[in-house]
């Protein structure tokens, strides 16, 4: 005949109250604590999955995320300023829709990818000028000289050193511009 030992009281893993387990492997004292424990485990599991997903992101995926945050910051930074190339403003009736403004690059991200996150190279631009007007490079240059000066424009034009982005750089850029945008919006 088998005899079972009387179980000893132990603390609940959630509320730390002492309880005597009814069955083997019981670690919580009541159903409410069991539900809390399950929720905590789900939150921890989601955090682990998020961390694993972040670790396996490719360079192109990180470039896309960093570019999205950078572009949003530039559009917010230049809010209220006229279009860099044509000088039209929202008050003139342009760019009133949600998709009315882009973050236009003087030197495109395709031809000068090392300047894609350079704040001198990017300014708020009307969609019709940026996408439908092929960037309007000559007008953009005129507006850029007025805004940042000829010396800085020539520095952009002379910059041709290739750059290979790393995971760490792209994460830092993404997080930096996300924080800058959040701070800028909270100040308004």
Image: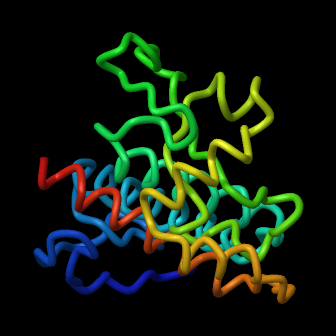
Q: Quadrant of residue 106?
A: bottom right
Q: Nearer the viewer, residue 7 or 79?
A: 79
Residue found farthest to the top: 93
Colour scheme employed for the rendering of this structure: rainbow
Residue 124 in the figure: left or right of residue 93: right
Query: In this rendering, is residue 46 above or below 153?
Result: above
Q: Give residue 96's position: percent from left, percent from top.
A: 41, 15
In the foreground, 48 or 11: 48
Instruction: Please tell me how many numbered marks the rendered image carries.
Output: 0
Residue 186, position in %: x, y?
16, 53
Residue 60 x/y as whole percent: 83, 64
Which of 170/122 is in front? Answer: 122
Name above or below for residue 115 compared with residue 131. below
Q: Residue at x 57, y 45 (%)?
A: 103
Give whichever of 108, 155 is nearer the camera: 155
Residue 39's image quarter? Answer: bottom left
Q: Going by the image, does 110 lie left or right of 62?
A: right
Q: Residue at x 33, y 66 (%)?
A: 180
Please say if 29 is above or below 114: above
If the image is split into quadrants, where does the N terminus sit? bottom right
Q: Residue at x 44, y 74 (%)?
A: 176
Question: Residue 48, image x and y in percent?
Answer: 58, 71
Q: Residue at left 55%, top 80%?
A: 151
Q: Is residue 188 above or below residue 168?
A: above
């Amino acid at each position: 005949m088998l005899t079972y030992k009387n179980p000893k009281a132990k603390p609940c893993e959630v509320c730390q109250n002492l309880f005597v387990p009814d069955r083997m492997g019981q670690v919580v004292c009541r159903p409410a604590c069991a539900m809390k424990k399950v929720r905590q485990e789900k939150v921890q599991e989601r955090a682990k999955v998020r961390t694993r997903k972040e670790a396996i992101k490719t360079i192109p995926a990180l470039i896309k995320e960093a570019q999205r945050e950078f572009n949003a910051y530039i559009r917010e930074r230049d809010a209220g300023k006229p279009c860099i190339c044509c000088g039209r403003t929202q008050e003139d009736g342009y760019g009133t829709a949600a998709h009315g403004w882009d973050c236009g690059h003087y030197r495109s991200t395709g031809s000068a990818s090392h300047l894609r996150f350079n704040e001198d190279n990017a300014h708020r631009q009307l969609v019709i000028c940026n996408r439908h007007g092929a960037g309007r490079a000559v007008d953009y240059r005129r507006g850029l000289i007025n805004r940042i000066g000829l010396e800085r424009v020539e520095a952009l034009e002379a910059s041709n050193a290739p750059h290979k982005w790393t995971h760490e750089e792209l994460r830092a850029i993404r997080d930096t511009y996300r924080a800058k945008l959040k701070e800028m919006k909270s100040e308004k």
